[in-house]
Image (cartoon, grey):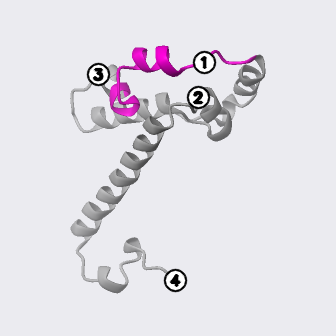
Amino acid sequence: SSVRPWDRTGPFRRLSETAMASLTVQMEAYAFRELVAHLQWRKDVQNIDLMNLAGFCRNCMAKWYHAGAKVHGVPLQYEEACERVYGEPYADWKKQNQKKASEDQLALFESGKELHARTE
């Protein structure tokens, strides 16, 4: 069995609540950065396919990033959040990478809307 820091076992049992909270935030941030890097590398993966398979896409991530900035009082425009997620201005990414969605993709998107991420 693996040691999980949130269980406060093994080498983590001596950490204070503050240290554990900080470590948790750092691990979550690392996971986010890795996901963003992977999606920036996989420009071939279309947002509509992400939405149809997982219920979220790069735009959702940018909206969550933007909302997080707002929660913490960081002045950040939505376009800046998009650039953080896409690795370039959204308009440039869209022009170079986004393909026209097929009728099947659009139908699947519409039929699965109740399972899409909440971004408001």
Marking on residue 99: 1
Residue ID for mark 4: 1
Structural crowding at the residue carrying mark 1, measured as other residues with C-alpha within 10 Å and reported as few (<14), some (14–19) or many (≥20): few
Q: Secondary structure at mark 2?
A: loop
Amino acid type, mark 1? Lys
Residue ID for mark 3: 77
Q: Residue at x 31, y 56 (%)?
A: 25
Q: Position of residue 22 (x, y in %)?
A: 25, 61
Is residue 83 shown left or right of residue 98? left
Structural crowding at the residue carrying mark 4, measured as other residues with C-alpha within 10 Å and reported as few (<14), some (14–19) or many (≥20): few
Amino acid type, mark 3? Gln
Does any portion of residue 120 appear in the rendered image? no
Give the mark, 4 or 2, whose residue is nearer the N terminus.
4
Is residue 54 shown left or right of residue 103? left
Residue ID for mark 2: 46
Q: Nearer the viewer, mark 3 or mark 1?
A: 1
Marks 4/1: CA distance?
44 Å
Marks 3/2: CA distance?
24 Å
Q: Are marks 4 and 2 in contact (CB under 8 Å)?
A: no
SS assignment for the magenta stretch, majority: helix
